[in-house]
Amino acid sequence: MKANRIIITFLLVLPIVFPTHLFAQNHTLQGFVRDATTDEPLIGATVFQPASQKGTSTDNNGYFRLTTSAKATLEISFIGYQKLLFANPAQNDSLVNLYLAPGLSIGEVKIEAKHTEERVTGLVEIPIDLLKKLPTMTGEPDLMKSFQLMPGVKMGDEGTSVFYVRGGTPDQNLILMDDVPLYYVNHIGGFLSVFDMNTIKKATLYKGDFPPRFGGRLSSVLDIRLKDGNVNQSKHEIGVGTLSSKYFVEGPILKNKLSGMFSLRRCNLDLFMRPLTEMNSSGNDVRSYSFYDLTAKATYTKDARNKFSFMAYSGRDKLFFKEKFADNYLDKMNNRWGNRIGSAKWTHFSKNSWVATSGVSYSRFFRLISTIEKEASQNDANKTVGSFGSSIQDLSIFSSVNRPFNKLDLRLGLSSTFHQFTPTAIKSSGGGNSSEEDTLFINRLHETELSGYLETDWDISKKLHISSGFFAMYWLGIDHASIDPRLSVNYSLPNETAIKASYSKNHQYIHLLANNSAGLPNDLWVPSTSSIQPEKSDQIALALSRNVNGIDFSIETYYKKMLNLIYYKPGFTVFNTLNWQDAIEKAGEGTSKGIELLIQKNTGKQRGWIGYTLSKDTRQFEALNDGRVFPFKYGRLHEVNVVYNLEISSKVSFSANWIFASGNYITLATQTFPAIDFDYFRDNYFDKTFVDAHNYGGVNYYKTASYHRLDIGLNFKKQLKKGERNFYFGIYNLYNRMNPYYYYFKSSGGSRKLYQFSLFPIMPSVSFTYKW
């Protein structure tokens, strides 16, 4: 704690003791960089003054501030847009709008002018227009699966969009939609995430070196920024794919004041699943699955210096079945889960360059399973009703300020969050109309979280840049505080080469008890308590990067240590009535270390990347595996990703990706031997019955077969008199690789053999969209 106090004192004093010449202001230009056709703010656009070799980049509001010489000529550039030359007027504190026209991919960008966040380690960005063209299983572009193709980001079970970052678990990924956390981001089976790519302006993944403004997770932050909506004209898009259909619209609501966007996506499966299953079973066996995603955002510009934004997302999955048996017995199950989030924010751009944002947000994830069992002819006389529920919801108030100086950017922020956890609520009733409800187990916990951060980005010289700060958190209920220091150093060498180093400490007070099941979210969100300490991690990273003729080369090595991890005890699941605190192993340790290589090209007609990861991820619990270290389930040793996109013409583009990964680790029985069936023996003392008992060699001791596949996709675009037509055709797993989905034993001829089950053969997919 003494070391933490010294670091924090240093970081607090650091901005104050800077030499005063760092803040000298000859001429200050403030403004926004926007898309010329939609008026959308461009995040990360470069504003550069060639004469002084000074530059900056726009923030999440498209806002920039630059101290320049009077009447200097500036270059404004952004990938995918035409470069703009701007003659700076000789006016102090002027606020301007700079518009870039889309249609041209620029080449090199001087390293002094790069976005500050590009100087940190472990940063991943993929252009949104490229994301939309990558081949997928469902024929619909998917944000989460695209990031799985990057070094250090590993997939889980095949076909799912869940990812694991540098040895961490999915709950250790903080996923933000316009600063609001989402707790579950996949639809059934994980085949599709909840994000409609049409709504997203930018998505940035931090794999370890979190900016200090982010906290509360150990492994990664996925920062998703939604579009504000086209200010100039209305645009519509409808789409029909293999799995879902969608509608998207954006445009002005009040001229030059209020714009908005709206997206609705709905699953197609239930439209034919329910009638087909009902028809094939004469109404005795009905099954259905559906989901929807609704995303909306409105942005009100009161004047040049005040902006208000309102965002909402609602998504829900529903799995339903009804089965009638020969004895008139009826069994129904309705399984629902989803997210509800929303926020309201006010952003003020002051004349002295402060940018202040305040607002409120709400987030809720819920799961509810309801069952009904009855004799169909008894008019509910013998009906049994049961339900299982779980949820987490947050209500937050937040405020932040950002002040760019001549060579220093300073950020401060505070927030307060009220959490409500309902890990498990199980209810049942039965026995007729007069029966009383029997509550087997219900638990609800409340917790208040206070957090704040200090963040500084300092250009010490043209070659040396330092980012520093800390994220602090205090949980009132358990009287526990943490302070997480962050430090990142970037040193520029000749020939657009840079060395980067970083250190990051993180604490996590929210945990996910996962069953590792394929498909359904059978997981519980639980808080830290007096007996369950917050998870924590320390990560160091070192990277070398270089840009050669528009191609980025990078190599990065990292080491991460995790403490206070939790794990379900063998044999326990979310449906146990035992208190969840008694069903888990505590105080686990984890390590992750590796090397990541990336060659990436984001401009021109041919784009894509080649990534390679060499890593080792382990876990250790005192009561598991005899206290010995064991491999993390998804800790693949080698992983290679090749992504390629070719613009064949203005109408046709081709995309492909190839994946290779070492096998992951599972627990299998090494031996079987006969054992007495004690349940049967209790009732039949003189008649012993034997069953097979299993001996397991160790936790995750078995390594599965290697995984690899090739996907391709073709996009056809045609301009019509009114609108634009797009047709996509893709093939998943082109050479029909039978990758393992799970393993099982089967006895035949007196011998017991291990078999592999493969779920996804070669699969075509199609989708159609129309824009106007």
Image (cartoon, grey):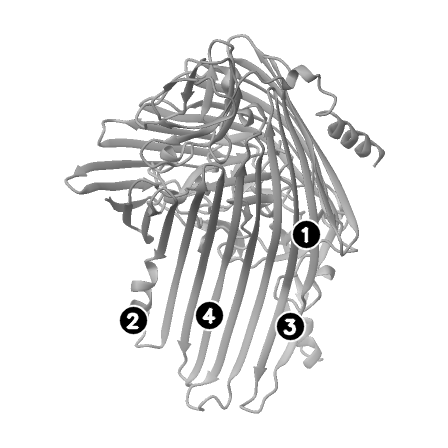
Give the residue type that dot 4 points to: Asn
Taking the image as drawn, is residue 693 in sight? Answer: no
Q: Which numbered dot is residue 689? A: 3
- Which badge, 2 or 3, is on the more N-terminal residue? 2
Counting from the top left corner in percent of width and height, residue 206 is at: 56, 34
The residue that label 1 is drawn on is 567
Mark 1 vs 4, N-terminal side = 4
- Placement of 691 over or under 52, stated as above or below: below
Q: Note whether residue 29 is visible.
A: yes
105 is higher (above) or lower (below) than 212: above
Q: Earlier in the sequence, mark 4 or mark 2?
A: 2
Please tell me in which quadrant of the rendered image residue 400 appears.
Answer: top right
Other residues around mark 1 within 10 Å, as few (<14) / some (14–19) / many (≥20): some
Dot 4 falls on a residue whose secondary structure is: strand
Question: Closer to us: mark 3 or mark 4?
Answer: 4
Mark 3 vs 4, N-terminal side: 4
